[in-house]
Image (cartoon, coloured by chain):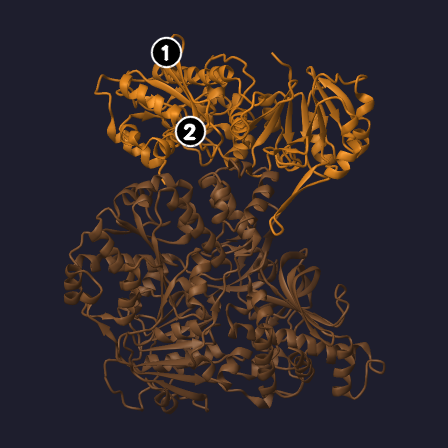
Chain colours: A brown, B orange
Amino acid sequence: MSSDPDPPEYAPITARGLERTFPQYEGQLQHAESVSAQAGAYVDPHEVLGAGLADSISESVGDLYTHQASALRHLADGDDVCVATSTSSGKTYVYALQIARNYLADPDSTALLVYPTKALSRDQEQELNEFFSTLGLNISVRVYDGDTPQNRRKQIRETADVIITNFVGINVYLAHHTRWHTFWANCDLLAIDESHTYTGVHGMHVAWTIRRLRRILEHYDSDPQIVCTSATIGNPSEHSRRLTGKSFTVVDEDGSPRGKRDIAFWKPPVDDGLLGPDADFEEFQQAQTNPVREASSVLAHLGLNGTQTLMFTRSRKNAELGAKYASNAASSHPNSGYLSVEPYHAGLGKETRRGTEYQFKSEQLDGVTSTNALELGIDIGSMDATILTGYPGTRQSFWQQIGRSGRGDSDALSVFVARADAIDQYILDDPAYVLGDAIEDAVIGLENNPVYAQHILCAAQEHPLTAADREWFDGDRLDRAVEMWIDAGKLAGDLSRSVRYTGSPRPQSDISMYTSSDIQFDVRCQDRDIDMEPIDRERAYRDHHEGALFLHNGVQYEVVDFVEDVPNPSITVEEVRTNEYTETISEKTVRNIDPEATRELGNGYQLSWGTGTVEIHYTHFRRKDINSGSATQPLRPTGLPPIELNTQLMWIETPPSLQDDVLREITGEDSSTLTDSDVMEVFGGGLHGAEHGMIKLTPLELRMDKSDLGGLSTIAHPETGVPTWFIHDAVEGGLGFTKRIFDQTATIAERTRERVSQCDCNGTSGCPACIMDSQCGNQNRFLHTDATLLVLDNLINQL
Amino acid sequence: MSASARIACASPQFVDQAEPSLLDDWLTYYDPSIVLLTGRSPEPRAASHLRRQLDSETLLYHPASDAPASGPRRIDGVQFVLSPTEQTLCKLREYEHRDLNVDRPSFVLSGLLELDVDTTSLSTTLVGREEYVSSLQTNQLEGEYVHISASLPADYRREWDGLSVIGGGIDSGYAGTPLVALDCRDDGRVLTRSVTRSQLGLRALDQVGGKRAQQLREAGFTSREDIASTSTSSLSDLPGLGQTIADRIQQSATAIAHDEIVRKSDDPLPNGDPVYIDIETDGLSPTITWLIGVLDGTATDGRYLSFIQTNPDEPGRAIEDFLAWYTANASHRPLVAYRGWKFDFSVILDHIIEYCPHYEDDWNSTYRFDPYQWAVEKQNAILPGRTNKLEDVAAALGYERDETGLTGAAVARTYQQWMADRSPSTEPDWDRFESYCEDDVRGLAVIYESLAKSNRIVSTNEPSRDITETTTQQRLSDW
C-alpha cells in the first residue's frame, strides 16, 4: 500500500494526484499543502536513565526522542510533567519508563494510568505488558474497569503493579477506597493520557474526580507524581493545572520524525444556478453537494485505488450515511468495484466495534467512516489516508485526525472536505489558520456549581470532610456547598469537627460524567432491541420529542412515547421508513441576568458576563422531505413544557441609537418611517447575524463545539432596555466558555466580521458559510449580512 | 414505656396503582392510626380508594384535599395538630392548655413545607418556612412541637432555627421509593419504618414479580393465604408456571402463612458453635463501628458481650477490642451476621483497614456466615415473616423482643449527634443501645437455630472451616 517511498504524482496518494485522478473533479481542490518530512532528534538513553534500564532500552527501542528524554529528566527532578507533542510521538514511553524507574527503586511501587476510553485501555494493557517484558521487568499491567469480571477484581487490586482504568470507573471505585488501600499506599505515579480531551462538562467532572482521588491518596500518605500526555493545545500548563490542581512543567519540543504529508483542502461543488438572492438555509444545502456524499466519493476513489482510508464525520448519523454513500459511489466509479467499508461510532455495540477495529487492522476493509471515536490512539494499524468531513471543531482535533494517516515515516494524504459552514469556509479562505502554530485553549469551567456540588457529596461519603478540605475544594465555596447539603438533609456535622454523608448509599452512582444534570433518558424500542446510549434532557427535548424522526445505526426511528415524570425517564421509539426528517422550532427567553463582570466600552456600548436563566421552549415541529427540504406536514405541537437553564452568559448591549444608524445606512430611512417588520428584518437581522456569527466562530479560539453555546438577540431586552445579544453556555451551571468569550470579545468579533465580509453569498440573508446556523430555533429568520457588518463595525470601534 | 402513634405515608401514585389486596396487606403490615396521603393536589380518587380500605378507627389525613381535617387530635396517647393551612398554625396558642398539654410534645402535620435545593446558587430553601414561622408565632408558644410535612421526603430531618422539621414521605411507595411509616412517640421522637412495595401482597412471594402477581390474581389467587391453601398442581396449570416454580411459590406462601422455615436444599449450615454479631454505626455510609454486640451461646442462654466505644475520637477501639477477644477465644468458630455480606462484614473490614490494619489478615481468615444470603440469595431456605428483615423473621419465629423504642437509623442518628456535640444533653443512653443490640443478636440466634433445626439432613462432622465457601462469599460482595 503506502510502502512505495516515492509514489508517482498520478496516484491518488498526493493532493495533485487526487486532483488528476478523481473522476468527478470540478475544481474542488482549493489549496494543497505539503508538510515536508522531518528528521527525528535523539538522545542516548544513558544520559537520562540508569545504566541497566538504559542498556535494555538501547537494545529494544534505540535512542529516545528529545522530548522523551526531557520529560524523564523533569520527572527525576520530582516535577509533574505535561508532555504536549504530536500524535504517535511516543508519549507513552515517558510514563512507562518512569514506572520502570520507580519499580527498580521499589518493587512495591504502583502506578495508575487513566485513559479516556475502554478501547484504548485494552490496547495499552497489551502494549505495556509487552514493553516491560522486553525490558525484562516483572511489572504486571492490568485493566480494571466496568468490563472487568467481578471475580478478578480483588486479585487485580491486590497484585497488579500498574492499573489501567478511566475516570468513570475511578468515580465509582473511590466509594470503596479501603479495598484499594495497598495500591494507594504504594502509588508513585498517576498518568493521565490524552489529557486534552477533558474539557467541557466531562472535563469538570474529571477535574473534581481527580481532586477526590488525590485527597484519598493523601489519606494513605501518597502524593504521586502526575504525567499528563496531551495533544498540542494552546494552554497545556494552565489546562493541566486546572485539571489536577497541581503545577506542571510542560514539554512540547517534539523530537519525533515525520513522513511527508499532503493536505488537500477540498470544496464540494456548488450549483450557483439554483440560488437566488433570497435563498434559505435548505436551498443552500440543496445547492452544495452534500459534504458527506463528496467525502464518501473521495473515500471510494481512494479505496478502489488500494489506498486504505479512514474518513471522519461529525456525527454518528453521518458515519452511518458515509459508509452507505461510499459503497454506492464505488459501484458508479469508472473502475467500478466492490468497496468494503464499515461505520464506527460509540453508539454501536462493543462487539461490532471490536470487529471493525480488527478487520481494519488486518486490512480486510478498504475504509472506515468514523466519528471522533477513532481520533484517539486506538490501534487500528496504519492507514494511507484520512478524510475529514468538515472541520472537527479545533485545530488540535484537525491535526489529530490528519495525523492518523501514515504513521511512522511513510507518506500520507489527508483530505479536508469543507461543509457549507462558517468555520469550514473560513478555513478554505485562510488555510494558514490551521497550518499556523496557534492552537486553541482547552477550557475547564471549574466554576460550575451543580457539577461541583455532586462531587462534594461523594467526597464526604469517601471520607468525612473537615476544614482542611477547603484546600481541595476551592476554599470557602466548600462551606456554602456543605451548608446547602446539610439543609437538604444529605450531610451532617460541621467542618470544624467533621462533616459526614447521610444520604442514600453510594452517591457516586448518581453522577453522570458527561452531563451536568442527573436526568437522562433511556431509549427503548417497541419491536426490537436498540443499542443506544441514554440521552441527556436538553437533547431529548430538542431531538427526541414525540413524533421526532432520527437515524441510529443506519436505521430510522420515530419517537412514539416520551416519559419524563418517573424516576427513570425514557423515550420509546419504533422503526420507520420515510424520506423525511424533523425540524424543531423553539422560543427562547433570557431573564434574571446578574452581571459579575462588566466592561463599559463608551458611547452606550457595554460588555457583561454573569449568570441568568435561559428558558427554551421547543414548541412545534414539522417534517420535511430529505431531498427537497420542503415541509411534508403542517407544524405540530411537541406537547413539551419549556426547560430552564440556570447558566453563565455574556451579553453585549448597544445604544438605542444604533437602530436608527443601521436603518439609515441600509434603507436610507429611519424607524419612524419603517414598519416594525422592516425594522426586525434589517436591524433585528443585524443583531441576530452578529450573535450567530460570533457563536459560529468562537471555536476558532476555544476548544469546544458550537453546540456548547446558545444565543439570543433582541432589539430591546426587557432587563437591559436596549438592543442586546446574548451568548450563553448550553449547560446547567455553565461551562466557562462565555467567560472566555467575554475576555476575548475583540478577537472573536473581528474574526466574525472578516468571515461575513469575505463570504461570497448573494443577497443579504447570509448563508450557512457565514451567519445561517443549522441550530437556529427561528429557521434563520431574520438575518441581514449588511446590518451584521454595521453592528460589528460599531462594536469593534469601541473595543 | 412511652406512648406511640403510627402514621403510614402513601403517595397518591402508589394508592392509584395498588390493587385492593395490596393496600390491605400494607395496612395490615403497618396497622397505622393515621394514614397520611401526600401529594399537592386534592386527589379524590386516591382518597376514596383509601377510605374503602380503612376501618373507622384509622384517620385518613390528606392536607391537600378540598376539605381536609384540621385542628388538635389526641391519638393513641400522642398529641397531633392537623394543619392543612397556615390558619390552623395561627390557632396553636389557643389550643395550648385547652386541647394540648404543653408538658408533652405535639406533632404538627401539614404539607406546607417543601425543599428547593438549588445547586446552581449552592443554597437550599425550605419553601413556605417564612409564612409558616410567622403563623406559628413561636415566641408565644409554650409547648414543644415537631413539624411533619407531607411535601418532604421521608428521610428528611433538620432543625431550621429551632423549627424541628421531619419529612412526611412525599414519594412514599412511588416507583422504587419504599413505603414509610412514622412512629410518633410522646417523648417527641419519630422513628421511621420502611417496607418496599415488592415485600407486600403476592409479590412478597419467592418467584413472583409484578407480571406473575397479576396472572395469579386473574386466576383467582388474591392473597398469600389463598396460595398457601391451594395445591401446587392448580398453580402449575397456569401458563408459564412449571412445577418447580409453582412449588417455590407455594412453599413461600406457606412459610409466610404458617410462620415457618421451608428448606429448599440439603446444604448444611457451618459446623462449630456460631458466634453471633451485630454492629451499630453512625449511618449507612459509616465512619465508625462503635458497638459490636456478640452472643456467645444459644438464643436463650447465651452470654451477651458488648464491645462499645463511647468516645468517637477513638474510632477503632471497639473493633480492636472485639478482634482481640475473638482471636483469643473463638477464632475457630463461625462468625454469623444477618445480611453480613451486605453490611456488617464489609463495614468491619473497612474499619479494620482504616483503624487497626494489623488485624486485616486475622479478619480475612475468619469464617463468616450470613444466614440471609444463604437462605434468600442462595435459595437454600424460605424465611417466614412479612419481610426478610431480621426483626420480622425473628418475630414470625416466635421471638419477642423488648420494646426499646429504637431503630437502627435512630441509633445511628443519636450517635451522630453525640459525635457532633459531646454534652450531657446529647449523651446516648448506652444501656438502652446495648439492649437493642442484644435483642438483634438473640433474634439472629433464633433464626439460625431454626434454620439448623429445619435441616433436611443433619450436618455431618466434617472439619468446620470451609475456605472455599468463604472466598466465594467474599467475591459476592466485592467491588
Along the line of sight, the residue nearer the viewer: A560 or A718: A718
- Residue at the farthest front position: A77
Q: Which image quadrant: the C terminus of chain B?
A: top left
Q: Which image quadrant: the N terminus of chain B?
A: top right
Quadrant in the picture for residue A66: bottom left
- What numbered label is drawn on residue A725? none
User: Is B93 rendered above or below residue B169?
Assistant: above
Q: Mark 2: which secondary structure? A: loop
User: What amino acid is at disc 1?
Assistant: Thr
Q: Residue A767, image x and y in percent?
A: 61, 81
Along the line of sight, the residue nearer the viewer: A420 or A221: A221
Q: Residue B455, image x and y in percent?
A: 33, 17
- Where does label 2 land, which residue? B315
Report in which chain the residue with disc 2 lies: B
Image point (29%, 67%), residue name? A70
3D distance between C-alphas at marks 1 and 2: 30 Å
Same subunit: marks 1 and 2: yes
In the rendered structure, are the residues bearing label 1 and label 2 in contact, judged by CB atoms less than 8 Å apart?
A: no
Residue A773 in view (yes/no) = no
Image point (42%, 56%), residue name? A246
Q: Residue A648, image x and y in percent?
A: 61, 61
- Where does label 1 land, which residue? B298
Mark nearer the N terminus (1 vs 2) = 1
Q: Residue A65, image x and y in percent?
A: 25, 71
Quadrant in the picture for residue A603: bottom right
User: Seen in the image, is B290 located left or right of residue B174?
Assistant: left
Pointer 2 local density, CA inside 10 Å: few below 14, some 14–19, many at least 20: some
User: Is B201 rendered above or below residue A579?
Assistant: above
